[in-house]
Structure formats: C-alpha cells, structure tokens
Image (tube, rainbow, N blue to C red):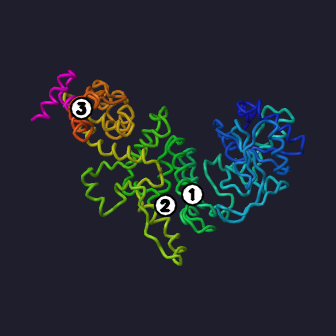
Amino acid sequence: MRIDIVNSLQKYKDQLFPIVRALAERGGIAYLVGGCVRDMVLNLPLKDLDIEVHNMELDALHDVLRRFGHVEEVGKKFGVLLLLGLAIDWSLPRSDSSGRKPHVILQPQLDIKQALQRRDLTMNAMAINLTTVVCEGLQEITTHDIIDPFGGLRDIAANQMRAVDDAFFVQDPLRLLRVMQFAGRFGMAPTPELDALCARMPLYDTYDDRPLARERIQSEVVKLLLLAPQPSVGFAWLMRISRAEELFPFLKDNPEALPVIDRLAPHVQACSADEQVMLFLTALCYRPLMSLEAQQIAAPQDERVFDFNLDKEMPDHPEEDRRSVSKEMSGNRMSNKNLLINCTDSHKTIKAVEVILQIIPQLKNLSDDAAGLIAIKKIAAQLAAVQTSLALVSKLSWCLFESTAQAVEQSLVYCVADRAGVLNGPEEALVQGRDLLNQIPPGPELGRLVALAYQLQLEESVRDKQALIERLMGERGA
C-alpha cells in the first residue's frame, strides 16, 4: 500500500516542513505518531497531528518552535508544546508511572519502539519518520516505511482493535470509552481479549482512587455521536460487554433507540455540534413503548427514567469508607445522578431534551387540518423557549415514527410546520408588553395578558392587533 504523505499533509506542509528541517539541524528526529498515522492508513482526512520529537531536550524544542511563532506550553510537565495557529501537538517521548496522573519522566533518547509501547491500541501505536520524509524529499511512502512494532497494520487489515499492553491499558479507565467511540467511528471490533479486558476493568482511577472524571466521559460520547457513521455500534458494544447501564442508564431496556440514532446521523451533519448532540440524546432517551404519563409516574421510584437534575449529589461518606465508595461509584453514583450526566453538563441541552420529549406525543398525533396548524404553532413556541426549532425536531420525528415518508421534507411534521410558517421559528406575537404599558403597569397582570394575547392569536388565527388589544381589555374588565 502506498501513501501520498505530502498530499495528506498538504494543509500543514508550508508551515510544518521548515520546522522539521530546523529540528533536524539541531539533531532532532520528528515522528508522526498516533491517530494521524492510523487515519493515513485508513485514507481518512487528518484533523490534527501529533509529532513526537526524539534526541532533543524540551528547552531546545521550545527554542526551535518559537522561531516560527508563539509557543504555548499546553502540557510542559508532559513534554507537550503547541505552536499557535498550527493544529499540531509537539511532544517528547516519555515514560510514566501507573495512573492517569502519572509521574512523568521525559526521555528524549528513548527508542521510538519503546515510546510507542505506552499507546492504548495497536492501531494507534504506529509512527512515521517525518524527518526522513522531509529531508529526503519523499512524496510517497509505503506501509513498509511505517514503524509498526505491535502489529497495528495487521489489526487494521483484520478490522479489529487490540491493546498494546494489557497492564498499561487498564491504568486509565478512559480507554474503555475510547474503544467505544473507535468501534462506532471505524466499525472495528475489539478482539475477544480486549472485550474481556474492558468488561472487567474498573471505571475509577486506581492510582488516584477517584471515579473517572465526567468531562472525560462526555468528550468520548460527543466524538462517538458526531464522528461515527453508525453511533449505535459503540453503545451496542458496551451493552454486549455489560458496561452500558452503569454509564448510560437511558440504554436500559431501550435497545430500539439504537437504530434511530443511526438513521438520524446522516441527516444532522449540517447541524451545529450542540444541535446534533441534543437530537441524538433525545432519540436515546425516547421510549416508544412507554407513554410519557407512565414515565412520569415511574420517576419517583426510579430516578433513572427522567431525572435531569444536574445538581443532585450522593450523600457524604466517612473518610474511612472513601476507598470502598469510590469503587462503587462506577456503578451507582454515575447512574443515580441522572440519565444524561455522562453525556453533557449543558443545562441548555438537557432542558431542550426534556421539552422535546414532552412534545413528541403531540407530534406523533399531529393532524393535517386546522387543528394541526394550531397545535404546530404552539409547539414551535415551546421549542423557541429552549432555542430550537421544528426544522431540527422534524428530523427526529421522521426517524422515530414517520418512516413511511421518503424524506424529512415529506414528513407530516415538516409539511404542517412549513405550511404554518413556523418551521424555523415561532409565529411573531402581535401584542408585546410595550403595547399595553399605557393601560397596564408592569407586573404579573401584564405578563398574563401578553400570554393570553399570544394564545388567542394562535388558537383563533387573529391578525388584527388593535382588535386583539381591545379584546384583552374587555377580558380584563370582565
């Protein structure tokens, strides 16, 4: 297999290659490592680069980089520098002690094969000698030029994921989530040995004795949802190894949600990242076999149903019980806080999910008549309150229960909303608070009448602003 490496690095070439030459002049050897090498092999576009520089101390690397711009020390302790304006992490080889917050020893003279041993999966434990490519003017390389001491190329060809080192892999619980999102993104299956490893590894940091940080989990979930052509593959793998419920309780007894997110994925690519996450999470939390009323009744007994309270905490525990409690957190604390705690911290997103879940039954029962136009206008107003629209939600409703329509634009929800003029936002209110201030002082009564005006406008299709104000005054007098 031949790789046109210069073309792969085209958007970086003009800035990158002079830096590599300057490093070589100081005796440094620059290696492309990790995901960018994997993506080249998979013929995928490169999102960012990781370059590991050998035979050079950190201060010397800093000196060379600053000749080309402002250098940020994003992880100086870990030997990681960033040149402003260039999406490349520059690092030194290192060895680590156990745990996610290890004692780091920078080892500039470390052999590249030894440096790759601390990678999680074989497909991420490959390197390309970029100094050779640049200084010898190579246009192409072959897979024989890829440094691959652990069989990453073989595993990619076999469409499988395998750990480089089992003992090192389990030291960071995030690696379980990385396997999840890689499974969805690349359609690769973990080996039976990796399955077994992930099924039993703890979801807490054994070195620091604390649960896996929520934001780290959320980051991997977002990658799965936004980058995977079939996000369900990652969740389905977690279910298969019996790790899904402790992390994502919305998947409990809800496997029918998984095909929905796969169907949704190609139709939300043009949406913002926040919008995509909102729609995916709503689909995952929707339970078509249980009515909303039944879900609300169930909530007091089982807070995993629709508990969106981000601020709820577990009771305090005595210090002597901290070790045993932390070991239980991977199962209990994560699932008991609420359904979406491991997916997002955004109150805006969670509130939007909650509102959409409440209106789905209305969308499902929407009629194609005058009553349907009134209903869809009210729904548009509800969605506007959480900064979303029927143009977005119609994609979800189409995937959930309008499968007979050949496209979103042919679905009933989309067509009724379009006909009502509320596809991208609610109908503008005829009467605002300022229109009544000369007759009613600010306060609850003013708010009540403005809300009543909008209700009458939607329900009775009122278009005469003055007539509506007079009616409000009549209602007030009565």
Among the 4 quarters of the image, the one containing residue 280: top left
Question: What residue is rendered at 24% in x and 29% in y?
Answer: 436
Q: Could you tell which of marks 3 and 2 lies nearer the N-terminus?
A: 2
Please give left or right for residue 355 compared with residue 4 in the image.
Answer: left
Mark 2 is surrounded, within 10 Å at the Cα level, by few (under 14), some (14 to 19) or many (20 or more) other residues, namely many
Mark 3, residue position:
454
Please give left or right for residue 209 compared with residue 125 in the image.
Answer: left
Q: Could you tell which of marks 1 and 3 lies nearer the N-terminus?
A: 1
Residue 462's label in the rendered image is none
Mark 1, residue position:
176
Please give left or right for residue 414 compared with residue 318 in the image.
Answer: left
Residue type marked 3: Tyr
Mark 3 is surrounded, within 10 Å at the Cα level, by few (under 14), some (14 to 19) or many (20 or more) other residues, namely many
Residue 243's label in the rendered image is 2
Residues at marks 2 and 1 touching, judged by CB atoms closer than 8 Å: yes
In what element is the residue under mark 3?
helix
Mark 1 is surrounded, within 10 Å at the Cα level, by few (under 14), some (14 to 19) or many (20 or more) other residues, namely many
Can you see residue 335?
A: yes
**Position of the C terminus by quadrant:** top left
Q: Which residues are the magenta region?
A: 456-478
Percent position of residue 125, x then y: 71, 51
474 up-or-down from 258: above or below:
above
Question: What residue is rendered at 44% in x and 34% in y?
Answer: 267
Rounded to the nearest angstrom, the CA distance separating label 2 from label 1 is: 10 Å
In what element is the residue under mark 2?
loop
Residue type marked 2: Arg
Percent position of residue 426, x then y: 32, 30
Rounded to the nearest angstrom, the CA distance separating label 1 from label 3 is: 51 Å
In what element is the residue under mark 1?
helix
